[in-house]
Each structure stands twice: as C-alpha cells, then as structure tokens.
Image: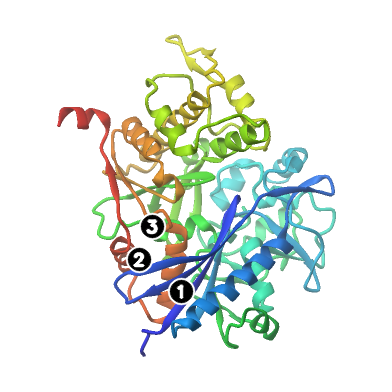
Amino acid sequence: MDHSTNAFAAIDIGASSGRVILGRTDGKRMDLEVVHRFPNGVRMIDGALRWDIERLHSEVLSGLQRLGQRASERGWRVASIGIDTWAVDYGLHRGGTLLAPPHAYRDARTAAVIDKVHALVDPADLFAINGLQFLPFNTLYQLACEPVLEGLHALLIPDLLAFRLTGAMRTELTNASTTGLLDARSGEFSAALLEALGIPDGLFPPLISPGEAYGEITEAVAIRTGLPAGTVVVAVGSHDTASAVAAVPAAGNAGVTAYISSGTWSLVGFELDAPVLSARARKENFTNERGIDGTIRFLRNVGGLWLMQECLRQWELDRLEVAPLPVLLAAAGTLPSGGPVVDADSAEFLAPDGMPARIRAAAGQHSPDGSWQHQDPGSDPAAVVRCILDSLAIAYAGALRTASEVTGAHPEVIHVVGGGSQNSLLCQLTANATGLAVLAGPVEATALGNLLVQARAAGAVAGGLDELRAVAAASTEFIRYEPASIRAAS
C-alpha cells in the first residue's frame, strides 16, 4: 500500500498546555508540525479543582480542523488521530452524558478517604495486585469520593475525548494501569479489587490496546472539522508517559533503558519486561505501569517542573520584574553548587498558588549528623530556580539509584525526554548528581511516540519497539551531557 500521502494527527494535552500536531513519515523518520496550541489548567468549579473539558474538546476540534486544512492543501490524507493526556483523572457518564467537569488530581478531596480505602484493602495487598506506588490522587482513591457509581461509566480523560470524537466507549490499557484497579500481572481489571472496594463491574468500558481503533469519527465531527468520513481514532499510549517512553531513542541498548520523562511531572525509572512486585519495590514507592508492546514502566513519580512553572506564574501575578526564563536559567547556572534544596516529592507542593513562599519555607540542608537545617535561598528568583533544579536532580539520582538496587539493573546512560530535555542546566545537574551521561531529546517525545504507534497501525512503519525507536532516533537531534567530574578529567 502506498503511504506517501498519509498524515497522522496527534492530540497531546498536558496539565498546562495542549497541542494538535501533524505527523508525516517515510518509514525511516517522522516529521512533526505543531498546527494548534492552547493553554490548559485547573479551575475552581463548584468548590473543587476541575478540568474544563468542554473547552478542551472545543480546542481539539479547532486543532483538527486546522490540521485537516493543512493536510488537504498539501494533498495529504489524514489516516488517523491519536490522543494522549495525563493519567488518573476521569469523567463520570450516565447514558453517554457527562455528569460534571472531571475533578483534577491536585484537588485535595481524597485526603478524607485514603484511610477508608486502606481499611478495605491493606496497602501491601493493593501493591501485590496493582503494583502501583502510593499516590493520594490515584484513581481508586478518587472513586472512593464519589457518592454514586452504580449505573455509571468512568472514562479516563483521553478515552473521554475519544468518545466525543467517535461515540465509542473504551479504556486504553496504558492509562488503565494508572487507576490502581488493573492487575499488574494479567493486564486486566482485578475482579478482586473491584469487589473489595465496592466498585461496580463495568464502571470502566472494555480495555483497548495501543494500535487498536476506537472507531471512526462521527458525522458531526467530520462536518465540524472538515476531516473525511471514515477517519479513524487509534488508541496510542494514551497515558502521555507511555507515549513518551515509546519514543526514547534506545534501540539496541545492551542494558536496561533508563529514562526521565521531564515535564510538569518527572517520571523516573526503567523499562522492564515484567512488573517488580517485591516488598522493597513497595517500600521505595515504585510503580509498575503498562507501556507499549507489553513492556512495564518501572518508575517513581518525582516532582517536576511544576514547581518552577508555579513560581513563574506567581511572580507574574505579584507583578515582580523577573528576567525571561533563559536569562533566569543562565543566572541560576552561575550560582555555586551545594545550596539549599527541598524534597521535590513532598505533597506540600501539589497545590497551586504561593509556590515561591512554600519553596523558601521548606528549603534547607542535611547537617553532618543527619538533621535537617532550614536554609532560605532568599527572594532572588535565580536562587529559587537553582534550589528547584538542584532538588530535582538530587531526586532523580535517588530514584535511579534505588531502582538499580531494587532491580539489579545498572544503566550506562540516562535518556531525558520531554520539555525538560531543553533545560540544559537541569540536564547537567542530573548528569552531575547521577554520575551518568545524560542524552537529552526528543523534546516532543510524547507526540512522537503517539504518531509512531499510529503510523505502525496504518502500516507506514514496520516492526517492534526497537524499530519505532530507530525512527525516533533518526528524527531527533540530541545533546549529550557528561558528569562534571568526567568533563573536568577530559
């Protein structure tokens, strides 16, 4: 089949922004073009932090219309659409109607139900089945907040958007693995957990794997976007991290693939063939999430660039004269190492607002006797940024070191993908903290992984993960960062 006129649409929505991206491939490399960008963020609606799903849906349709026009002008056919977003959040539906805007994971509502959930299923038993690290916003805790679930359907955010495009209700596998309700070994929803937690069987629609089709777009969507009837929505790694890891350029790696998907959150870990469900893995708060082609993303969620994004937003709200981010990062890079740090994983940094003050209040250093001594980085934005980036690098190093101890695997290089791969100071600090070389890129890893899965489903790219990653590598320019000690020696 001739795929020379095929184009693919990636809908890639993160917690702070979204894009609709046009992808084209000759089977050896993938070219990406962003055709639509739009902001995203939580809003206080009815006394809770929620997502404005109606606006997101409208932006998706606008982006698809632009993408279709661009493709048509060039004589290309849009073969399929793929959707990825953040994980764990969902919208409840009755008879196909959304009952309320989906709650955001940063809402504090689950604090009141965690003990209730753990009284029903002991945390050790939870991990033995689902293999997930404890996070207070995991889907199973959110569901415990709902007054009624009987007779409803829960659609995770990418599945909700796919439903609006196709009318088909499905649950994509990689995202389902973040709910806490999937059996880590079988890859199916755990009947035992559903029963123990009082969650109705069938709350989540049937599972769909990356590469399978939700269905064709509806007539109304075709009319609204101008896309041809019959355009297919294909399941990709709808959890954005699953798509990002699929594009890690690690084809032919002799050892384990170590990655940091760096954005609003940082996902730090290894790609493995099977879940690790040991007591040590649970104690260290690691998670086992599904990846493309049956892989396991053994990782830990680490606080990400959210801390810096929120500081920048707060400084703007406070009308402080802060230098542009490149200048701010350059200034932060001139500051000496060994300054104050925070626990980047602390729940105190989950909520929005007032982030610079919270960073300053929490910053400090461990003294030789192991005690924590508060050390204020001061109000200089460059010093606060340096504190955040040092803290992230230390957290990355700790997570990777522990992952090696738990699995016995020892990577030789760390792949940093996503928006954080553009932050040269963070990449260098990560190399210094881990003692390993950092290979930065691709920046658009999530969209690239999304598009590669679509292209393979259409037959435009052939092979397994290694072949997909070879295309990703051919499509990317990388920067390599050596640890400071190695650079000094050379």
Mark before the other along the chain sequence, 3 or 1: 3
- The span from disc 2 to disc 1 (Cα, nearest Å) is 13 Å
Q: Residue furthest top?
A: 369
What residue type is disc 1 on?
Answer: Gln
Quarter of the image holding residue 310?
Answer: top right
The residue indicated by pointer 1 is 454
Whether residue 74 is visible, yes or no, is yes
Residue flagged by tag 2: what amino acid is it?
Answer: Leu
Quarter where residue 273 is shown: bottom left
Mark with earlier residue (2, 1): 1
Q: Nearer the viewer, mark 2 or mark 1?
A: 1
Dot placed on the residue nearer the N-terminal end, 3 or 2: 3
Horizontal placement of 214 versus 332: left or right?
right
* Secondary structure found at label 3: loop
Q: Residue furthest left?
A: 490
Q: CA distance from mark 3 to mark 1?
A: 23 Å
Where 331 sits versus 165, above or below? above
Q: Which one is in front in this view, the residue at disc 3 or the one at disc 1?
A: 1
How far, Cα to Cα, is label 3 from label 2?
12 Å
Per the image, label 2 sits on a secondary structure element best described as helix
Residue 44 against residue 375 in the figure, above or below? below
Residue under label 2: 465
Q: Secondary structure at mark 1?
A: helix
Residue 455 in the image, given as x and y percentages of width and height: 42, 75
Which residue matches tag 3?
A: 273
Work out which quarter of the rendered image holds the N terminus and state it: bottom left
223 vs 438, nearest the viewer = 223
**Residue placed at 33% from the left, 33% from the top?**
434
Q: Residue at x 46, y 32 (%)?
A: 328
Quick one: quadrant of the C terminus? top left
Tell me if 98 is positioned left or right of 87 in this view.
right
